[in-house]
Image: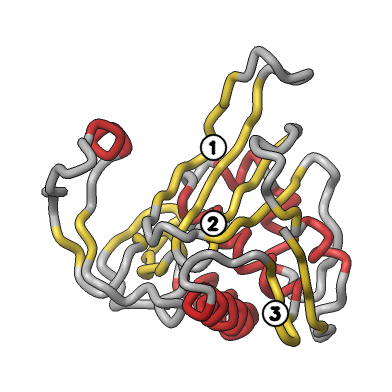
Amino acid sequence: MSRRNKAKGTCHLCGNFGALSFEHVPPRAAFNNRRIIKVTFEQAISLGPDEIVKGPIQQGGIGGHTLCPKCNNLTGHWYGTRFVGWCYQAMNILIRSHGKPSLIYLNYLFPLAILKQIVTMFFSVNTETFSKANPELVQFVLKREAKYLPPKYRFFMYYNTTGTFRFSGIWARLDPFSSRSTTLMSEITYPPFGYVMTIDSEPPDSRLFEITHFSTYDYNFGFSWRLQD
């Protein structure tokens, strides 16, 4: 999850200024080792269905210089391997179901570590000011054994069956037909899963699987999980 330091700035997690290491989002071992073409959000939504994507090429996976070496190494050591195992099991389901899974059936996962890796990824796709606005999430990630989250934070997942990837920092979605007209959310989608974080908001789609309860388990507690569509 790290490359040779090439940048300086403010760590998106601990908030310290200094050298930044390259953080793969998701971790490199979770199928994030391919060459990619980088485009802005505005460019992406303007592309036609058959239009060839053009832009700067980044080798070795998607990510950025967002975390200091200490935060990168700690989170990778504590959470990365368990998150990768979760992704490999899910990818196997996608392959065996020909991209049309009807259930989530994962054998012996470690929910707390998986959720903390997902939260770490959201720090990387948001700006460096996100940690200042959300100190509870910082402590949740940097204290390995810490459990539970304030109720304003909710996390969801879904199968990424299209093979596309997209990252968006915190943004407000307006829905005039909802009891709460504004949904404050951030999204990361990269096969095999997509993840959505909401803050003081209802989920943007009723088909999402909520995984906020992963924060209630002990760090070394593992179990099998089955969810039917």
How packed is label 1: few (under 14 Cα within 10 Å), some, or many (20 or more)? Answer: some
| Earlier sequence position, callout 2 versus callout 3 | 3
Residue holding disc 1: 170
* Most distant residue in the top direction: 176
Label 1 – label 2 distance at C-alpha: 15 Å
Please state which amino acid type lies under the numbered disc 1: Ile
| Earlier sequence position, callout 3 versus callout 1 | 3
| Earlier sequence position, callout 1 versus callout 2 | 1
Residue holding disc 3: 106
The answer to which of 192 and 150 lies nearer the viewer is 192
Give the vertical position of 145 relative to 211 (above or below): below
Quarter of the image for residue 77 reads bottom right
The residue drawn where x is 78% and y is 73% is: 226
How packed is label 2: few (under 14 Cα within 10 Å), some, or many (20 or more)? Answer: many
| Element type at mark 3 | strand
Residue holding disc 2: 194
> In the image, is 180 to the left or to the right of 60?
right
Residue 175 in the image, given as x and y percentages of width and height: 63, 19
Residue 92 in the image, given as x and y percentages of width and height: 53, 82
> In the image, is 219 to the left or to the right of 49?
right
Label 3 – label 1 distance at C-alpha: 29 Å
Label 2 close to label 3 by CB (< 8 Å): no
| Element type at mark 1 | strand
**Quarter of the rendering occupied by the N terminus:** bottom left
| Element type at mark 2 | strand
The answer to which of 217 and 160 lies nearer the viewer is 160
Give the vertical position of 109 relative to 214 (above or below): below
The residue drawn where x is 39% and y is 56% is: 165
Please state which amino acid type lies under the numbered disc 2: Gly
